[in-house]
Amino acid sequence: METITPALMTDQYELTMISAALRDGTADRACVFEVFARRLPTGRRYGVVAGTARLIELIREFRFEAGDIEFLKSAGIVNETTAKWLAGYRFTGDIEGYAEGELFFPGSPILTVSGGFAECVVLETLILSVLNHDCAIAAAAARMVTAARGRPIIEMGSRRTHEHAAVAAARAAYLAGFASTSNLAAGRAYGIPTTGTSAHAFTLLHDDEPAAFASQVAALGKNTTLLVDTYDISQGIRNAIAVAGPDLRAVRIDSGDLSVLAGHSRELLDSLGATETKIIVSGDMDEYSIATLAAEPVDIYGAGTAVVTGSGAPTASLVYKLVEVDGRPVVKRSENKATVGGRKTAIRRHKPTGTATEEIIYSQGVPDHQTNDRMLQRSWIADGEVQDSPSLQESRDHLRQNLISIPWEGLKLSAGDPAIPVVIVPTA
């Protein structure tokens, strides 16, 4: 299959609107679109902004190639006028929004896209595809990091999702506080620390478990992790220490009752003199199973399926809505899908101690600043030019500080109200 360009990720209905707007002369009307969530996924108390920097790079490269245009014309999707417009497409407007690592709540204007109607609407599917995926992964990963209470988590879900989504998921999980990933493409693309161990297949390949362990240690040294539950965990640990010695870096357990096995494994390792050998547990870990192991002698967690699928919330349910035309607020009044018109400005209000108390969103208004308020939006693209953006490490640090700032009730894994209330100040 041919390589798909970012531009061809556009949905056909967007081109339908563009064709009609070009014909009736409304394609260049000044418009403002906003990305927001009407509600958080069930059980969640906050969302996490992730993927924006990745999105901005895709918009920078957003071009309809000759092959794309030919396909659209031959399929009867666009006419000559629209084809010519697409061939010359470059985004020349403005994009502002929350920084990566920022928390969001229902109604938060996490991305604002301004420009001509056509140049903004053609980006809708790309914007929602990236942000709905990455924000969902980051929110799930952040909850797992909170549940881990400072213990490292390895992202190891590449085999449970699409090959390109796996790289984006590794980035979002690292932003959310995961320590490393097993995905080498993410390591190369984003500088994320990588780690990994062998699978059960490697043990089964050899005539016996000690032979498999000896081969791995011979190739990688004692600073490796041996998978000890292919046959019998207790014997596997004994074999691992017999082969590698008491200074083996770690053993991994991937099955069974991890609460019981972690304690027994720690006792056995200590009795064998391997007091510094770490215990890594994996196997369908999510925030709830991680939380249940808080009192057990687990050193590192490995999370796969749950993190790359959003741990029950595979999308952030973000929408992309037109809120302003030629400086005039426009609203959608559909039942349960009503919008608030006008370009929004958002601030986060804090106590002098730094604890966040509320998010205030102004529609076409000037924020009434107080001493401990913080503006939430920053420029990503201005007049079509990409602005400097924070590094992945800076975004990671930003999220850590944001999670510290919300009331402790907002970090609970149980269902409840958003961590802080959102107040929307409508157009005067």
Image (cartoon, rainbow, N blue to C red):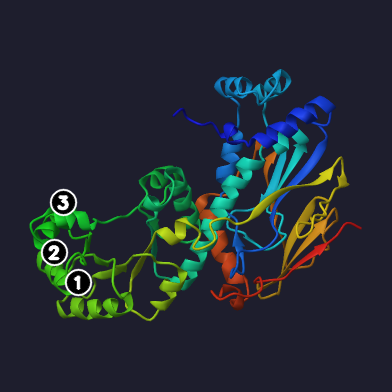
Of callouts 3 and 1, the N-terminal one: 3
How many neighbours does mark 2 have within 10 angstroms: few (below 14), some (14-19), or many (20 or more)?
Answer: many
Residue 384 appears anywhere in the view? no
Disc 3 marks which amino acid?
Ala
> Residue beneath label 2, please?
244
Nearer to us of marks 2 and 1 is 1
Disc 2 marks which amino acid?
Ala
Task: Examine the image and state in which quarter residue 262 appears.
Answer: bottom left
Residue at coordinates 24% horizontally, 56% vertically from top-left?
199
Placement of 294 over or under 141, stated as above or below? below
> Residue beneath label 3, please?
219
Percent x, y for residue 279? 28, 70
Placement of 124 over or under 73, stated as above or below? below
Percent x, y for residue 281? 32, 68
216 and 356: which is toward the camera = 216
> Residue beneath label 1, please?
233
- Point out the image quarter for the N terminus: top left
Of callouts 2 and 1, the N-terminal one: 1
